[in-house]
Amino acid sequence: MLCSIATHLALILTLLVTVVRPADSWMTTYQSNFQLACPAGQTVRRLESFFGVGQYDRVWNMSCSILPNWVDLSSCEWSGAQNNYNEVLIFQCPSDYIVTGIASTYDRSKLDRIWSFQCCNPQDYVTHECMYTSFINTYGDVMNYRVPNDHVLRGVESIYDQNRRDRLYKFDICKLAPVDFNNHVIVG
Ligand SMILES: *[C@@H]1O[C@H](CO)[C@@H](O)[C@H](O)[C@H]1NC(C)=O
């Protein structure tokens, strides 16, 4: 009898842990600073995050992919912080550069993050047909965004909510077009 109750409890506990556990592992931890950079020659393809209610913060996963047509990436540079705590973030890589890394600093008194980005030059290509997504998450909820295969990430915008202590994110994505030696876009 006792044994069977224990077995049942163990089973219930296992089920609870399985259901409640948000996700197994993330590349970042709550309330700490991080820098995630794509391997050389790759650009950001997917961004996922999970909001920890008690932590007033998100944990993040980023994955990257090579560019179509083996476009080469060069002249990579970090932007430095692009927003103030609790304020709007509006970032776009300069020129025709695209995003290849993301770094963030968390402030425990502000319960928010500032963001910086690594941008690289897709050699002999320019960004075109750029567009903004709508906000792709809701406050306190899981975020899972994958840049479509024929697009690349050029920028990020984000707003902060003082009550929820969380941010919404939208992305600036573009297609890449080759340019000729005179820097003219090659159409078609
Ligand atoms: C985050 O990425 C790591 C490494 O690719 C992976 O093992 C892990 O399952 C991912 N976590 C989530 C929640 O997707």
Image (cartoon, rainbow, N blue to C red):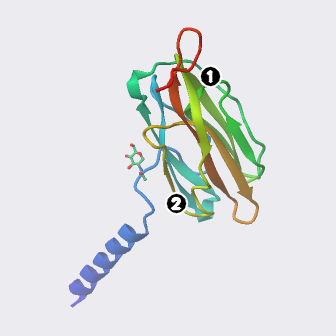
Q: Quadrant of the N terminus?
A: bottom left
Q: Position of residue 16 (x, y in %)?
A: 38, 74
What residue would you read off at disc 1?
Answer: 77
Give the residue type at disc 2: Val
Give the residue type at disc 1: Glu
Q: Quadrant of residue 33?
A: top right
Question: What residue is shown at x 27% (from left), y 86% (from top)?
Answer: 5
Horizontally, is 80 left or right of 28 in the view?
Answer: right
134 or 100: nearer the eye?
A: 134
Q: Secondary structure at mark 2?
A: loop
Q: Position of residue 110 (x, y in %)?
A: 76, 52
Mark 2 vs ligand 1: CB under 8 Å? Answer: no
Mark 2 is surrounded, within 10 Å at the Cα level, by few (under 14), some (14 to 19) or many (20 or more) other residues, namely some
What residue would you read off at disc 2?
Answer: 142
144 or 27: nearer the eye?
A: 144
Question: What residue is shown at x 44% (from left), y 21% (from top)?
Answer: 71
Question: What residue is shown at x 63% (from left), y 63% (from top)?
Answer: 139
| Label 2 to label 1: alpha-carbon separation | 29 Å
